[in-house]
Amino acid sequence: MLTPDISSSEQGKAIRIVVAGGGTGGHLFPGIAVAQGFMSKNPGNRVVFISSGNDFEKSALSRAGFELLTIPVSGIKGRGIKNQFGAMMNLPKGLTTAMGHLKRFKPDLVISVGSYSAGPVAVGAWLLGIKTVLHEQNILPGITNRIVSRFARRIYLSFEGKDAGMNPEKIRFSGNPVRSEFFDDKSVGEDDVQHDGDIEKRFTVLIVGGSQGAHSINLAVAEALTHIREKDRFRFVHQTGKNDEVKIREAYENAGIKNVVRPFFDDMGNRYRNADLLICRSGATTVAEITAMGKASILIPYPFAADNHQVLNAQALDDAGAAEMVLEQHLNGSLLARRIEHYAAHPEILVDMENVARKFGRPDAAMFIVNDCYQLLETCH
């Protein structure tokens, strides 16, 4: 496994890049981070995304300012025999559409970030002779990236030493790219301005269940609110997802605790920056964001994640003292309230957690990939 040379900060020539895949924040957000890195390298670069075009992708890419081209494709794994058959029958159309997009756009490079929608694009790129690389966010790669790795020129991994049977000569350890908004020092959002002027006095807890929210975490936090004693000491910022917004908003109102509740936050960098403690899942992208920013966290792994990778992620940070892991089967409101109050009462522990978390962070991951891709294109000409 090699580490790319990222020492060059020179503006590279303008190139055209396709980012293939997405679906969820875990795949899409690293792709956006890499796309932002290419635009930072040369504003004349052109980046488009090709994916299935679900509502989340459309919204996230619109906010980030990137074009989305769609293909007719759906997932196969865990969807039942009928849906799996339909997805398989749709693959030829997805491949044909992807190749049409590629022929019109004429990219210099295709970057697969995983998910089922990346497959037809990467295969189409291979058939058309377009150079392809991939980035794998998780400790163990998904099926799409395992297939793409066979013909990819580069394999960028988030976790060092985890080749998962891939060709070690292609592997570069990059870390997991984090979007530029996490490093932009912006002012506090308008909805965070407390009329009594006490925003800095309150212990701020940020709850993030991923791009879709996390129902079990939402319920545990709602219960925890009833157990917290010094309610005037706290302020909660809670991303609930669409389904739980009303219920969770009512829970805060009934508890009488300062709060900002949204189904989804567009300014997550600010939310992280202003938080004293995070309560969240431990997907690879969330862990990358936490460690890049050096934030203390209570990690609650999603128990049904593929290959149990969220537990592995959380356990690594817990063992090092960078976070506390709470398994979902142990999660309840009373426990969560006790842990929140414990950290609020011991800021020195939070500082220690933050310092250790930063040691895991790779804030330069996106530029690792960008500069190495430029080196790849230069050596292949």
Image (cartoon, rainbow, N blue to C red):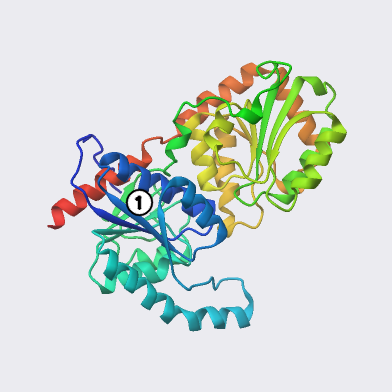
The structure residue drawn at horizontal position 79% and vertical position 35%, both measured from the top left corner, is 335
Q: Label 1: state its secondary structure.
A: strand
Q: 338 or 99, which lies in front?
A: 99
Circle 1 packing at 10 Å, graded few (<14), some (14-19), many (20+), is many
Residue 101 pos. (x, y %): 34, 69
Q: Is residue 319 left or right of residue 41?
A: right
Q: Is residue 56 visible?
A: yes
Q: 237 or 133, which lies in front?
A: 237
Q: Is residue 219 above or below residue 259?
A: below
Q: Which residue is mark 1?
A: 156
Counting every numbered tag in the picture gives 1
Image quarter for residue 114? bottom left
Residue 132 pos. (x, y %): 29, 61
The structure residue drawn at horizontal position 70% and vertical position 45%, both measured from the top left corner, is 240
Q: Is residue 109 above or below residue 73?
A: above
Residue 169 pos. (x, y %): 26, 55
Q: Is residue 376 above or below residue 277?
A: below
Residue 316 pos. (x, y %): 54, 40
Q: Is residue 160 visible?
A: no
Image quarter for residue 254? top right
Q: Is residue 56 left or right of residue 173?
A: right
The structure residue drawn at horizontal position 51% and vertical position 30%, both measured from the top left corner, is 357
The image quadrant where one finds the C terminus is: bottom left
Q: Amino acid at mark 1?
A: Tyr
Q: 61 or 342, which lies in front?
A: 61
Q: Residue furthest left?
A: 381
